[in-house]
Amino acid sequence: MAKSDKKSGEGAGPHHVAIIMDGNGRWAQARGRPRLFGHHAGAKRVREIVEACPDLGVKYLTIFAFSTENWKRTQLEVAGLMSLFRRYITKEARDLFARGVRVRFIGDRVRLDKKLVKLMDELEVMTEKNDRVHLTIALNYGGRDEVARATKRLAQDVASGLLDPEKVDEETLPRYLDTYVLPDPDLVIRTSGEARISNFLLWQSAYAEYEFIDTLWPDFSRDVFARLVAKFGAKDRRYGGAVDEIVI
């Protein structure tokens, strides 16, 4: 009796993990504190998770920091978040560089404060030669918005004669996405108990595994992260193929 060979790579951990960091506000409110207190706690948690990546074999980490829908929050909270992003970049830049982290930002920068955009640009340039961990921060990002912007650029190339419309296929659009230099995520984690993807990496996550966990983001520890990475490694991912059959 023989069994067909297992799929190459089975048992390997995720190369690229994407995280929807949810629950900062509820974490703060449970402690009788304002929502921004939770966002500050959540920002500190990012460092621990980035530091854990090399030991867990995670080369790429993408985090959802601010969505295109988050502008609907109160003016006070939005202003506080923008201030937090500026402070985070300023405070963490040297440490990220020293740890070999390459930082990228995805999302539409047009609506963002010019000072924040300048800091984002500077951090990307500072870390562009790093390769230990690739940290991508989704800021003013929405999956539908990203696809719409990509489609617009694709259409412009078709109109200008740079792209033959007859050759457009499912491999074409990804070259126009914000994530065109990144591999697709293997694992997408959402904290806080909500079971929805909230317009995050819609195209890229077509074959990703999803984990929806109850832990609020400020409580998301290295140990929780390691457990989810190990759980992923135990999965048999078939990408649409059939379950291995027993051959008699």
Image: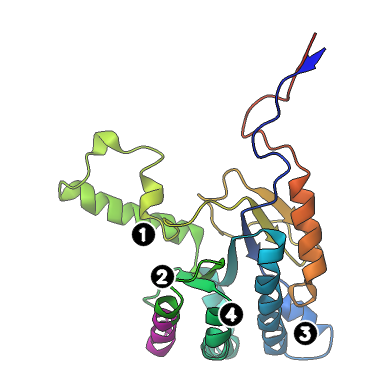
Residue depth check, mark 3 versus mark 4: number of the one nearer the observer = 3
Residue depth check, mark 1 versus mark 4: number of the one nearer the observer = 1
Mark 1 crowdedness (10 Å alpha carbons): few <14, some 14-19, many ≥20:
some
Q: Secondary structure at mark 1?
A: helix
Q: Report the residue marked by disc 4.
A: 73
Mark 3 crowdedness (10 Å alpha carbons): few <14, some 14-19, many ≥20:
some
Q: Secondary structure at mark 4?
A: loop
Mark 3 to mark 4: distance in Å?
16 Å
Amino acid type at image mark 4: Arg
Mark 4 crowdedness (10 Å alpha carbons): few <14, some 14-19, many ≥20:
few
Amino acid type at image mark 3: Ala
Mark 1 to mark 2: distance in Å?
9 Å
Would you say 230 lies left or right of 65 here? right
Q: Which of the pair 155/242 is nearer the observer?
A: 242
x then y, percent, for residue 69: 54, 70
Q: Report the residue marked by disc 1.
A: 149
116 falls in the magenta region? yes
Residue drawn 60% across and 68% down? 63
Q: How is the image coloured?
A: rainbow
Mark 3 to mark 2: distance in Å?
28 Å
In which quadrant of the rendered image does the C terminus lie? top right
x then y, percent, for residue 151: 34, 52
Q: Which residues are magenta?
A: 112-122
Labelled pair 1, 4 in contact (Cβ < 8 Å): no
x then y, percent, for residue 172: 35, 44
Residue drawn 65% across and 40% down? 9
Would you say 161 lies left or right of 2 here? left
Label at residue 108? 2
Up-down: is 201 above or below 165?
A: below
Name the N-terminal-most of marks 3 and 2: 3
113 falls in the magenta region? yes
x then y, percent, for residue 4: 72, 20
